[in-house]
Amino acid sequence: MKTKINGTNGKIISLATSLGVCLALYICLVSSLTAALLILALGLGLIIYGERKDSIEQVYLSVEKNKPIVLGIIVLFVLVLPFLLHKNNYLLHVVVMAGIYAIVALGLNFQVGSTGMVNFAPAALFGAGAYVSAIAAVKFGISPWLGILLGMVGAALLGLIFGFPALKTRGYYLSLVTIALQIIFTQMIVNTAWLGGPNGIPGIPPYELAGFSFKQSLKILGLTIPYQINYIYLTFIFLGLTALAASRLYTSRTGLAWNAIEQDEIVAATQGINLTKEKLLAFALGAAFAGVAGALYAHYTSFIGYEDFDFSKSLILICMVLLGGMDNVSGVTLGAILLTIIDEKLRDFADYRMLMYSVILITILITRSQGLLPKRTRKYKEKSTGMPCVGQTVTMGGESSGSLKN
Amino acid sequence: MEVLRTEALTINFGGLKAVNEVDFVIGDEVVGLIGPNGSGKTTFLNLVSGIYRATSGHVHFMQEDITDCAPHEVRSKGIARTFQTNRLCLNLSVLDNMLLGLHSRQKSTWWQAIFQPSRCQQELEDNIERCFEVLAHFNPELIDKRYEPVSKIPLIDRRRIEIARAIVGEPKLLLLDEPTAGLNTEETMEMIDDIGRLRESKMKVSIIIIEHDMAVISRISQRVVVLNAGRKIAEGTFEEVSQNEEVRTAYLGG
């Protein structure tokens, strides 16, 4: 399979890949659980086959080369999606949640995937963003738009605090510390009346743009589309921005330093990497992502409570990163979207939901321990040869760009 | 010109003085650091590179006291090192490992990585060129293998990459901890030639080299310092040191 890819061939490959992924995600979303799992198995099989035949690199390469086509298709898919689902509020809601969780997972990936610091408290950081933005809006009447910024800063500060134990502990010990932090966060909310305590915060105002409330359904071309459409667009704009930032960081000096810390801290330090600074940065930046997602979540659901941000939510977020593929922006995005969909499909199982969820996860991770799209070696855009950059590619679900843009 | 000087450098591990009041000076030269196993050679390098904090004594580098500097600060000031057991980031590619060596010389921040990618790209391209130059010095084939993970590279080339990674940031002092460990005789000689040529190239670098192979030491170093049980017991040219009675006793245990 060492055929040279010429221009048209590459275009066709990238077109097929992006269309295929969008279609697969759509079918997963609308069909039954069995069909969704079949699609997942099929996709997994295709990826493994591609790796065996060494053609996955060509797919990555052509997708990277034809980024405009791929991004165009994904944007088009996200734009059209609400129209396809306009009769089903519930599925629209799943799409919004998929986007929100994908943002959190991208941030969590900085710690878990890039730097190798297992953080069991992403839901706390997500919750910090949600609570900051919600309190700002409900108690102080601050605009939700500004709330996104406040949520981001608030979560980043909490991330910094969470990051301090990471300076002294590693591995299991760090995991235990973050579990403790997660529990402290939940307990603190339950026991603070000002934060709504166990009752949560109701009545969080929605976003408004020039007098148009995002809680209004949209009437386009004679179709009335539920209000979720506004949030789908808003969430996926943010997902696109965060994916872009994440992939730029990945190919940067910072991303490389994170990887070096994951591999060997002593070596990293003797290469001039400031461990304290880089570890805290991984926590703060990841938390900032979670904060943005949290703010979006609060103003989308208009009610938040502590149980939205508890330990089990953290576990699910970690699973998204593990399943998608650590330190691979497209993989993490895809993992988050898929797991959100599967999780929702499992609601039919009521009490057995978590059991089924675990069985699916274990099966996937046994067959594919490194996740759907595993970590790859970075390829850079070089001066003389004009080697195409393939830092981060196969864009799935969320817009993720390749390495540094020119 | 004095590059590095230690004054009564000491570190205690419990009751053990692993390095005991060592006075050491290196100028523009290659100094061999030898001694029996457990004599404190690697500990000495760990002290200089900031991995261990000295119990007492001082380290001066280019007239500056760096005794309490963290490893990353030591590296930024211009001291690079390699490790006895080859320590590359095995999952990362050859080029990524090389770029790590330039970390302290790069200026772009995470902020610029997100918001000014074109500027970072410029810096990255220059750095890649620089990495190629250094790789070419050791083994030009490595340039073609730049995107291969280091885990797929043979040992001698891994050793080369580790030294290349140390040298790419143009340090003033290079600390080599047994660069030929695990290599056969032929490979050892190749490696020594590579290191020797470093001194001839435009990168003017002083080198402290730990080595068990006396043929290597006699060939490469201008001066030899001998440690035993944490103390410096002799120093001078290889011939002088090898005639020294105390050194002979230390090595032969007589």
Image (tube, rainbow, N blue to C red):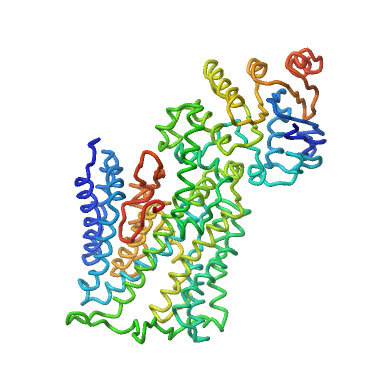
Which residue is farthest left?
A222
Nearer to me, A339 or B181? B181
In the displayed structure image, the side of residue B186 where residue B118 appears, left or right: left
Q: Can residue A356 be seen by looking at this rendering?
A: no
Q: In this view, does B183 lie above or below A310?
A: above
Residue B79's image quarter?
top right
Number of numbered labels in the structure image: 0
Identified at 48% across, 64% down, the residue is A122
Q: Where is residue A368 in the image (x, y as percent from the top left)?
A: 34, 47
Identified at 45% across, 72% down, the residue is A294
Identified at 44% across, 39% down, the residue is B93
Residue A87's image quarter?
bottom left
Q: Position of residue B142 (x, y in %)?
A: 44, 30
Q: Position of residue A362 (x, y in %)?
A: 36, 53
Q: In this view, does B11 lie above or below A69?
A: above
Identified at 73% across, 16% down, the residue is B238
Nearer to me, A381 or B176? A381
Q: Can residue A136 be seen by looking at this rendering?
A: yes
Quadrant containing the N terminus of chain A in the rendered view: top left
Q: Position of residue A156 (x, y in %)?
A: 54, 66
Residue A304's image quarter?
bottom left
Nearer to me, B210 or A67? A67
Q: Is residue A298 above or below residue B189?
A: below
Nearer to me, A351 or B112? B112
